[in-house]
Amino acid sequence: MMSQMELFGLDQPSLPTLRERRTMRVLITVTAAPNPSAAHGETVCVAGLELGDSGPVGWVRLYPLNLRHLRGRGHGFRKYDIVELVASPARHDGRTESWSPEIGSIRVVGHLNSWDARRQWLEPLATDSMCGLHREAKTQLAKARSLGLAPAAEVFGLDIAPHPGWSADEQAKIDAYVNQLELFSEDDKVPLRAPRVTVSYRWRCSAADCQGTHRQRLLDWEVVAFERHFPDARRDVLGGIIERKFLGEVCAPERQVSFFVGNQAKRPQTFSILGIYWPRRSVKRR
């Protein structure tokens, strides 16, 4: 049976090449919301699709990154940018997609501005089912994929709840980092604010035997950035605004929704939604 890489004509470097320090080109598809970090103040997990000369190579996860720090030094990027960088296999993460980027090497070399431009790279890979990724994580363990693009057969709704705020440990990390900058740097650092709400999707994936019981937290930075446009909205009003955007608009009937999903290093069977791919449905001519 042909592998997925063979089926879609993906580049097939040898395994040693895949897991050595090297230069790569990556189409950025996901930027998760930042979390407190003792070493970096705040870090985000970025994921994307590595691009080869003749097609996609595979999914990659880039961590740790402090995007505010990067943007202040001219190395910032945004969703659907194509970046070139040097990266090495992550030392403390056994997931094969995980890489540690060399911050100073990051540069933007392109951007895919239209859904049509993105389709040619992403839609051949939108073949994963969430049920299948769960099964793979249970049976293949370390060899299982930790990133995927899973089409949604049906999106039932959103669950929006108050965010609990930073834990004492997380707040201590933020405070220590900000104090360090005040002592040794002239950076104007604004402490990382916790989101006001958490957002989870309830949905059914494309697996024929899916029972429609997927409920997964949305970790996308876009939802946090969106909520901050409405700082004075009551929480119930904010929930309605988020639902109109991320359910009514993003998951409208005319949208072909797939979820960028990823698991946790310590709990590989636990997947979250890292981002949303939502082009208009293709119109088939008769």
Image: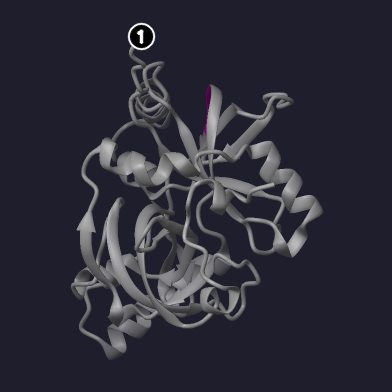
Provide the residue designation for mark 1: 286
> Relative to 225, is 21 above or below?
below
Q: Is residue 190 visible?
A: no
- Where, quadrant-wise, is the C terminus in this rendering? top left
Which residue does the image show at 20% across and 76% down from the upper left?
73
Q: Main secondary structure of the magenta part?
A: strand
Position in image of residue 109 (x %, y %): 21, 64
Q: In the structure shown, which secondary structural element does the residue marked by tag 1 occupy?
A: loop
Using the image as rendered, state which of residue 85 and residue 221 is in the foreground: 85
Which residue does the image show at 40% across and 30% down from the upper left?
246
Position in image of residue 125 (x %, y %): 49, 44
> Relative to 26, is 187 above or below?
below
Position in image of residue 139 (x %, y %): 81, 52
Which residue does the image show at 67% across and 45% down from the upper left?
133
Does residue 93 belong to the magenta stretch? no
Give the side of residue 91 with respect to residue 50, left or right: right
Q: Quadrant of residue 97?
A: bottom right
Position in image of residue 98 (x %, y %): 54, 68
Give the side of residue 109 with respect to residue 123, left or right: left
Query: Where does the magenta region start and end?
Result: 156-160
Q: Quadrant of residue 244?
A: top left
Which residue does the image show at 31% across and 40% down from the upper left?
226
Residue at the limit of the structure toward the front, as seen here? 1
Q: Is residue 97 visible?
A: yes
